[in-house]
Structures are given as C-alpha cells and as structure tokens.
Image (cartoon, rainbow, N blue to C red):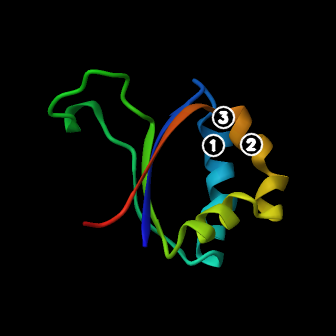
Amino acid sequence: MIFITQLIYINEGSEAVFHDFERLAIPLIKKYNGLLLLRLRPQNEAFVEINTEPPYEIHLVSFETEDDFRSFLEDEERKEFLYLKEQSIRSAVLIQGKQL
C-alpha cells in the first residue's frame, strides 16, 4: 500500500474550474484500487505553525501498489479533462509514502 499526500495551490478565481476537475477525477481513483482517505480545505486558524503559503486543498489518497497509482495518472479518460487541472492549479506538492 502506498499513500499520496498532495498540497494543492490554485490560481486565484479558479475555484469553480478546480471543482469541475475534481468532480471528474476523484471517482477514477477507485478504478485503480485507490481510496480518497482525506480531502480538506484548511482555514488559516487551523494551522498551529506555518512557514509557507497555505494550500487551497490537501488530499490523502491510498493505492494498493505503485503501478495502480501510475495507471491512474495515465488513465485515458482523465487525460481528456486535464486541461481543467492545468487551468486551475498553479502548483502542487506531491508526497509519496508508505505506512510504517
């Protein structure tokens, strides 16, 4: 099992486009033995300490294998609407790990 944490920074004013992308992309996770464990939009008061720009959204996703995750990224249906991601996301930090 692998875990993917993603910190997502969106372009100002692109919230609706980002939500459209998520509405299409998130259901595909299950197709590749994945599970969205956590999706949150932290408010400033939620941070105990922060030395960087706060992300718009944070995702924690698990996949059975690295190959499942790679297959999700290469999904042909997902590729059809990646333009929504490109329009709305300014940058993202992806952290991959495993349970200890």
Residue type at mark 1? Phe
Q: Is the N terminus in the top left, top right, bottom left or bottom right quadrant?
A: bottom left
Residue type at mark 3? Ser
Left or right, residue 99 beside residue 88: left
Quarter of the rendering containing residue 33? bottom right
Residue type at mark 2? Leu
Residue at which label 3 appears: 88
At 30% from the left edge and 36% from the top edge, which residue is drawn?
43
Left or right, residue 79 beside residue 41: right
| Disc 2, SS | helix
- Label 2: few (<14), some or many (≥20) within 10 Å? some
Residue at which label 2 appears: 84
Residue 22, percent across and down? 62, 54
Residue at which label 1 appears: 18
- Label 1: few (<14), some or many (≥20) within 10 Å? some
Label 3 with label 2: CB-CB less than 8 Å: yes
- Label 3: few (<14), some or many (≥20) within 10 Å? many
Left or right, residue 3 beside residue 42: right
Label 1 with label 2: CB-CB less than 8 Å: yes
- Up/down of 47 relative to 27, above or below: above
At 79% from the left edge and 41% from the top edge, which residue is drawn?
83
- Up/down of 30 relative to 20, above or below: below
At 17% from the left edge and 28% from the top edge, which residue is drawn?
49
Q: Rounded to the nearest whole Å, what is the CA distance between mark 3 and mark 2?
A: 6 Å
- Up/down of 36 relative to 51, above or below: below
At 76% from the left edge and 47% from the top edge, which residue is drawn?
82
User: Is 71 in front, or is 35?
Assistant: 71
Residue 99, percent across and down? 30, 66
User: Is 80 in front, or is 5?
Assistant: 5
| Disc 3, SS | helix
